Amino acid sequence: MSDEPKGTETLGVSFSDKVPEGDEMSRAVCDHCEFVHYVNPKIIVGSVVAHGGKILLCRRAIEPRRGYWTLPAGFMEQNETTQEGAKREAFEEANADIRIGDMLALYNVTHISQVHIMYRAELVTPEFSPGMESLEVGLFAWEDIPWQDLAFPSVIWALNQYKSVIHQSHFTPFTNPHPSEDDAMDILRGLKKV
Amino acid sequence: MSDEPKGTETLGVSFSDKVPEGDEMSRAVCDHCEFVHYVNPKIIVGSVVAHGGKILLCRRAIEPRRGYWTLPAGFMEQNETTQEGAKREAFEEANADIRIGDMLALYNVTHISQVHIMYRAELVTPEFSPGMESLEVGLFAWEDIPWQDLAFPSVIWALNQYKSVIHQSHFTPFTNPHPSEDDAMDILRGLKKV
């Protein structure tokens, strides 16, 4: 999933960092053809999918964090909406047909230049099974969520924020928790209980 | 601002569409080095900036829609948050120091694979001037907004949606208007008044 060309030196292709005309930032520009390799943040679309008071989680079959539990989410693709992308990811990872609701949260994960857009969702039918990227898939009651075995801090953020507005039909979407209030890493390390 | 390599054929570099291992979609893969050229939707970050009941607009010095008025907005860059990006764009396009507020809207512009994330904002100081990408910059009372000379339908969406929640401190962010209710093109063509 790298953005960087591999082994292109052997082809005599090389890029230099320079500021293209009319731009304000340095970019990787091909030394031969002046092609500007713009790299911009990527969007992850996903959802907290509920059914009968339980939450759908997928155990990852791929790195990073293979074997850990996550929410259905992945890279948004060309020519789809954010909602369509979140629906597609639930189908790919859990063979689940979901109905997308309100936007739950927008997270900025700046160190890897990702923007995560998460929705509330519901299962349309109570059917699901592991997709290609999942080892297993399950519906979890809140008290059965395997907090220490979740894949990423953002999964913890989304689950807790989801619960905090579970009875609200309208709310302002959440963002990253303030660092001083972010206990996700402590939860993953088993130092704190939810 | 093209994502496509130009003139690379002359270097003997060629890409073929194929599905990389473990992927589910066809991608442009280099025939020599197997580099996968992932192309994903890009994020535009921007804001509706208010000061004293007026709105900040910028007249575009660049294509597309050179000479038309727009909101300060542009491509989100690596390692910044969506809010930081919106603030940077106001500075680059209008030399304006702004304070970012709530998320106003998330628009999916699928035919060009863009996601627009717009915020409410205020001028920190009543100072602004045209940046490199603007011909002029001004504060407009609602009744003075040059509707027929706005650059894009999404500018009309954001302005109207901004006005509809101007007295609300909390609201659910907007999305694209439903096609049956979207009169932005009629407004740009002068067929309908705001």
Image (cartoon, coloured by chain):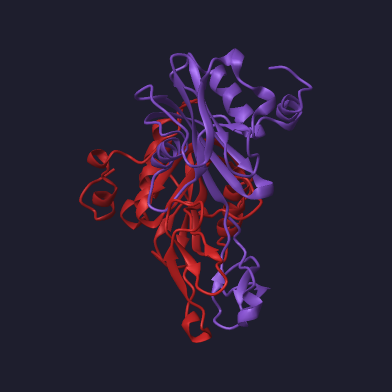
Chain colours: A purple, B red
Q: Is residue B29 above or below residue A50?
A: below
**Percent of width and height locating residue A146:** 64, 22
Q: Is residue A47 above or below residue B45?
A: above
Q: Could you tell whether B80 is left or right of B119 in the image?
A: right
Q: Quadrant of residue A26?
A: bottom right
Residue B145 visible in the picture = no
Q: Residue furthest left?
A: B191
* Position of the C terminus of chain B by quadrant: top left
Seen in the image, is B80 located left or right of residue B194? right
Q: Give the image location of residue B158, x and y in percent.
A: 41, 43
Q: Residue at x 55, y 67 (%)?
A: B34
- A36 or A146, which lies in front? A146
Q: Is residue A63 above or below residue A71?
A: below
Going by the picture, which residue comes out furthest to the front? A135
Give the x, y percent position of residue B184: 29, 48
**Above/below status of A33 relative to A41:** below
| Residue B40 seen in this snapshot | yes
Query: Which picture quadrant has residue A95?
Result: top left
Q: Residue furthest right?
A: A191
Residue A168: percent from left, percent from top = 47, 16
- Front residue (pair A32, B176): A32
**Residue at x 64% of width, y 34% of height:** A151
Looking at this view, is A35 or A169 the one in front?
A35
Residue situated in front as seen by the camera: A122 or A91: A91
- State the count of labels: 0
Image side of residue B52 versus residue B66, left or right? right
